[in-house]
Image (cartoon, grey):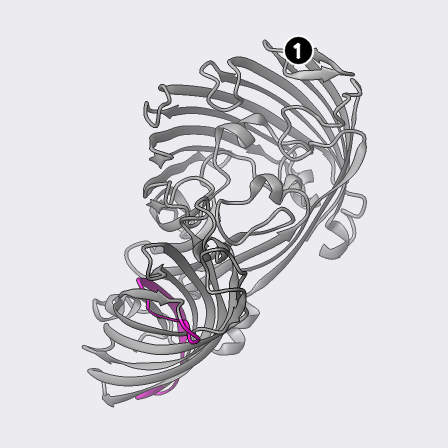
Amino acid sequence: MAPYRLQMSGGYTSLALGGSAPSYSGGMFQTTVGQNFNLDSRNSLFLNGVFRLGALNDGSGHDVSLVHFGLEGGYEGWIAPGWLSAFVFAGIGSNILYSQQAGVAPSITRALDNQSMLALSLGGGLTFARGIVVLSGGFQPNFGLSVPETPDSFGGRGYNPMGYFFMAGLDLARLVDVAGGHFPRDVSMGQFVRGITPGLYLDTTYTANLGAPSTGMNAMRIFDTRADRPMFNYLELSLDRAVDADNPFGFRFDFGVGENPRVARARSSFSGDWYDLQQVYARLRLPIGNGVTLRGGKFATLIGTEVIESLSNNHISHSWQFGLAEPFTHLGVLAEYPIITDSSGASLFTATTGIINGWDNVLDRSAGIGWLGALSGNPTPWLTLSGASTVGSEGGRLRSILDFIAAVKVNDATSTAGGFDRFTASATYDWGHEGQGAGQPEANWHALGLTARVGLIPQVSFAQGFEVFLDPDAARTGTAQTMWSTRSTFQVTPFASINSPWARALRVRAEFRHDSSTNPSFLSGSLPSTSQNTFGLQLGYMY
């Protein structure tokens, strides 16, 4: 019996709001990723991270999407060993509602938009055919749903709806196990917990705009938008459990608060102006060939080299390429496979492919199901080449992007002993395209970014960047223009030589940036300008 399980299920969901006992039932889609802790050959305890999607209806033709995040634990016993088992479980989580009619007013459906409920889960089920076929069901008492009074509602009231769900699916982990791929058997709860790596990230900045814009804003910036004032950009907590041949189940959880979510948050649920569930996904490594790693949930894009966390980039400010040409996150499922590995098992050439729900979107149906994929390889130990692409419908138009990256990392004996990189550099090119549709013409955009960093000593590094962003059809900036910028950044890690990861996590950086455009997109005082100069300071912590 495989100690790891990935179950995929399907079903039906409905929602009734009338009367005094509103309820919903069913579950349109569920994926359950978890781990079994074996007691003996016939029994096991299991712990599952559960992610459910549902399409609900309020009885008047108004659709509501429901997403459930939860943690469930239970007990499974085999009635006919290897062929028939029964299980029971209990759990706790949250149901988040998202109304597709959020713009249609006023209605109860609109009032439900982006509300969340505390959800308890109680249920059980049966498995057949050595655990591969799974039938399950249960009910969920929910607490905390509130519907304000509107002209076409039943009046303002609090709801504690009772939910029911019924599932039928396949346990892919057991299917792989039966097919001959074997998971590790001797994994305890303690080993699972000890494999989780916590993270803490803090980013605060101050940007002085030498043009003193009358708006108090740095024009055309991504996150460092406020001029001449401190910014609390981001405080992020993360939990990460990596996967390998001995640890096939893992996950990633990143939750942050600050000013960054105003820009980086995905459409619909899980985020607001000051908070963002940036990443939450499960990993499962299937023992097929060199190892297939599945990733399902909300995750950062494969496109580009920069990330939302500024301290992980070479510069304080983010490029237009990252903020305008590329997506931030996706909701979907990816499969990653190392096609070629070296003698130690490290990947030399890796392919990734999967389906996503558009750009920076969780539940909004205006984005169609799209594709995301990447190929990356290391022809030499110091060179990495990669290409990535995504294509799908966005707002009634077909949007696609091609991304190409060449990255170099060179170290010597001194840098290796000191634990810092002597020299890193990357070149990134993006070509984006939107087809004609939804009353809009065909549009293209291009971006080229170059950046390099030199580690002078373990405590000090210097990075220089250059980019050019072409928006000839005004698709990304609202104005037909070509923009370019240079960024020069010094970083000081004051405690880099101290043998403590907590101390080495402190970063202090300073940056000068020059922006230019063929269009007067910036301000000098209250006058339009074709250029902008800023000086930025950053105090951050990345553990």
x 25%, y 68%: residue:
169
Q: Is residue 120 left or right of residue 264?
A: left
Q: Is residue 364 left or right of residue 436?
A: right
Does the magenta portion include 64?
A: no
Q: Nearer the viewer, residue 428 or 357?
A: 357
Principal secondary structure, stretch drawn in magenta: strand
In the rendered structure, which segment of residues is drawn in magenta? Answer: 19-43
Q: Nearer the viewer, residue 528 or 503?
A: 528
Q: Residues within 10 Å of mark 1 (few under 14, many from 20)?
A: some
Residue 25 visible? The answer is: yes
- Above or below: residue 125 compared with residue 167: below
Image position, residue 276 (x, y; %): 58, 51
Q: Is residue 142 left or right of residue 341?
A: right
Image position, residue 173 (x, y; %): 30, 67
Image position, residue 192 (x, y; %): 50, 71
Does the magenta portion include 37?
A: yes
In which quadrant will I find the N terminus? bottom left
Q: Is residue 162 left or right of residue 261?
A: left
Q: Hey, what amino acid is under mark 1?
A: Thr
x 40%, y 54%: residue:
295
Q: Nearer the viewer, residue 259 or 386?
A: 259
> Can you identify the residue that label 1 sits on?
530
Image position, residue 188 (x, y; %): 47, 78
